Amino acid sequence: MVDPSRSAGPSHAAFPSAAEYARYAPPAQTAPPPVRVPSSADALHSLIETTTSLRADGGLIPVLDTLAGPSLTDKASTRSAAHQNTLTLQGVNLASLTDDQLRRHTVGYVFVLGARLGSSKFDDALPLALRLAAVAEPAQLAAIPTRAAEFAWAILQAAESAKEVPRTLGPLQSLLAASFQGSYFTCVHSAFLEATLLTGSYDLGYQSIGRVYLSAHKGTPYLDVLTYHHHAGTVSAAVGDFAKAVELFVFAASMPTDAVSAIQVACAKRAILCELLATGNTLQLPKYTPSAVNRVLDKSIPDYHKLAKAFDARDWKGVEEASQAQVFRQDCNRGLVVQILGSVTKRRILRLRRTYSRLTLADLTAKVESDSATVAAAIERMVASGEIKATISGSPPVVTFIEDDDYASPANIAKLKQTAELSAFLKTDLAQASRALTLSPEYLKKQAQKIDGKDKGREGKGGRRPEQFGMFADDIGPAPTVRGVGSNLDDVGF
């Protein structure tokens, strides 16, 4: 009789037997158990109130995901009537819920109240949702980042319909704070910024955009990322931080894509204008900007390019002429253009500052081709904002420009320290990302395909990407525009 242990082969570290290999082999993956959907609203309510597990493989979340379907706020169009009635807890009175109950069962009530906000049957949904947003438990939100974002948008949309958007600011701010997970992007931020734009609370929105996002959860909607950078850039422009606005707008405009979004085009337009206000120069998009985006921008926004080129060349008459194009008003960017026209005096002063350290106010006024009151006011504004150091003194008044390259000042030291900390953080994050990439099966498979030459000849077999065909070369159509929140800079205090 054959000994099974001998037939398995020699026992050696380099040649393990079948039995030894099986001992260390990873466990076989089994299909997740079928989700049992509660048969009634009362059953789901009981499950929410009694659940103690948030495991994605067998707890409450799979049940709620099955009931909700692709989108939390979808109605009967993609969700059966039975699931809709169960998910919204039809017939269950939630008015007596305490804040502690809402906090302890955040996951369950995010789904329930999000679905109720998308229905016209529940008049008390918005007040309850605002209470939940204010007390939501961070660990539970971390388990459902996409649904938490849908919940935030549902609150905002319901408040817009009820004309009660100001009521959402505090709760959405609390929901945003509870949704932060290190450097991971949260789509709740997009909804919160939209609320600040709708209510004119630009300082509140501006205070929230200091966080640096380096990662995104799988399944994060691409449009939510674009929306965040569009809104954050608009808020920055509204408070006068044009350099920050350019950074945010450029990030959105240069995001990888084959099909250009209208939001990207809108961001590129505002980036061009904000760059003129920040530096007085023509915007240069990063080299990694998708070719599809570059082609659309080259063809569809000639008036923006004309204004930027005239300003960069210090052709002030050309600037005045280019600024009259109707497209700026149609794109709701007239407010920025007005500021650009108002910055001409400032740019002339800054240019003369490179040559002269002292000038009488009369001589400076003549060179700037303006009046003394306008020139003096422009200098005072630049001094107050920290752009230059200068004094106006004596009789007749003399303007003295002071060298301000004080790299040892407390402000510059603090900025240098903050930059060094961010650089160290980025270095660590990139190292971790690099290690993760080298272990990615998808990445290794693609590298192996390149080595084997499997990518050769694809262009002749229909494998070329859409942007390689110049699909935008002949017919761009009307210039894409973005309407809605924060698009009209004339209305944000300019």
Image: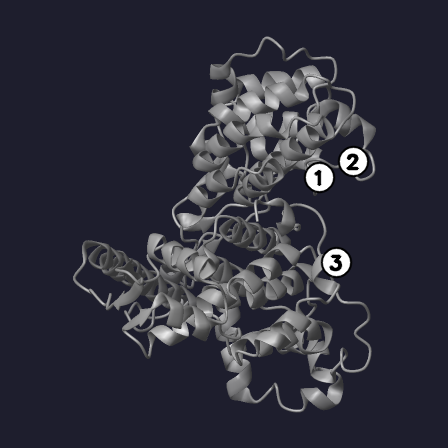
Lateral position of residue 170 relative to residue 292, left or right: left
Q: Nearer the viewer, mark 1 or mark 3?
A: 3
Q: Earlier in the sequence, mark 1 or mark 3?
A: 1
Q: Position of residue 265 (x, y in %)?
A: 66, 65
Residue flagged by tag 3: what amino acid is it? Answer: Gln
SS type, badge 3: helix
Q: Is residue 300 above or below residue 152?
A: below
Distance between mark 1 and mark 3 Cα atoms:
38 Å
Q: Earlier in the sequence, mark 3 or mark 2?
A: 2
Distance between mark 3 and mark 2 Cα atoms:
39 Å
SS type, badge 2: loop
Q: How is the image coloured?
A: one colour
Q: Is residue 73 above or below residue 395?
A: above
Name the residue tied to disc 2: 79
Taking depth in this image into account, of 416 and 420 the one nearest to the observer is 416
Verify CB contact (< 8 Å) between mark 2 and mark 1. Answer: yes
Mark 1 crowd level (few <14, some 14–19, many ≥20, 10 Å Cα): some
Residue flagged by tag 1: what amino acid is it? Answer: Gly
Lateral position of residue 235 relative to residue 125, left or right: left
Q: Position of residue 176 (x, y in %)?
A: 48, 37
Name the residue tied to disc 1: 69
SS type, badge 1: loop
Name the residue tied to disc 3: 330
